[in-house]
Amino acid sequence: PHLRALALCQLGLRETRQARATVSRLFALCGPDAELFRLQSRIELADGNRRAAMEAALAGLRRAPHAAANHVAVARCAAAARDWDAVETSVRQALALDPRHEEAL
């Protein structure tokens, strides 16, 4: 848990290289995890790597398709690409799973 918090802090400080290294360490320790893929996606978006961000978001979605947060991650990437139809679809899917999901509202 503390490494996840560290990666989030690094991301918040725009230290994306360090955040990416922390997430890589987490993947090595924990294996593939939907939450880590979401975090990786946010880091890639912060660096302007939309394709890598979407790939990470989709990997998280494949791991846990019933988690609203994973659909929101895909929506975030679609918004960065200005793919409004994909944003709407992903947000609707997130809200179908969790009608009170704050980011999807």
Image: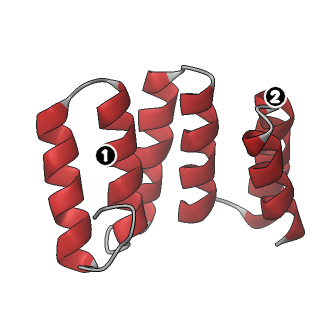
Q: Residue at x 55, y 19 (%)?
A: 48
Mark 1 crowd level (few <14, some 14–19, many ≥20, 10 Å Cα):
many
- Give residue 23's position: percent from left, percent from top: 76, 48
Task: Calculate the distance from the C-alpha at mark 1 to the C-alpha at mark 2.
Answer: 24 Å
Quick check: 5 left or right of 103? right
Residue 100 higher or lower than 45, as above or below? below
Q: Which residue carries the number 2 mark? A: 17
Residue 45 higher or lower than 40, as above or below? above
Query: Which three-letter amino acid code belongs to the residue tagged 2?
Result: Arg
Residue positioned most to the top: 48
Q: Residue at x 17, y 40 (%)?
A: 86
Name the foreground residue: 83 vs 25: 83
Is there any visible trace of residue 33 in the rendered image?
A: no
Could you tell me which quadrant the C terminus lies in?
A: bottom left
Query: Which three-letter amino acid code belongs to the residue tagged 1?
Result: Ala
Name the foreground residue: 24 vs 89: 89
In primary-sequence order, the first of circles 1 and 2 is 2
Of helix, strand and loop, which one carries label 2? helix
Could you tell me which quadrant the N terminus lies in?
A: bottom right
Of helix, strand and loop, which one carries label 1? helix
Color scheme of the displayed model:
secondary structure
- Give residue 13's position: percent from left, percent from top: 80, 38
Tell how many labels: 2
- Give residue 10's position: percent from left, percent from top: 82, 43
- Give residue 83's position: percent from left, percent from top: 20, 29
Mark 2 crowd level (few <14, some 14–19, many ≥20, 10 Å Cα):
some
Q: Is mark 1 in CB contact (under 8 Å) with mark 2? A: no
Name the foreground residue: 8 vs 30: 8
Quick check: 61 left or right of 19? left
Q: Residue at x 15, y 61 (%)?
A: 92
Q: Which residue carries the number 1 mark? A: 75
Quick check: 52 left or right of 22? left
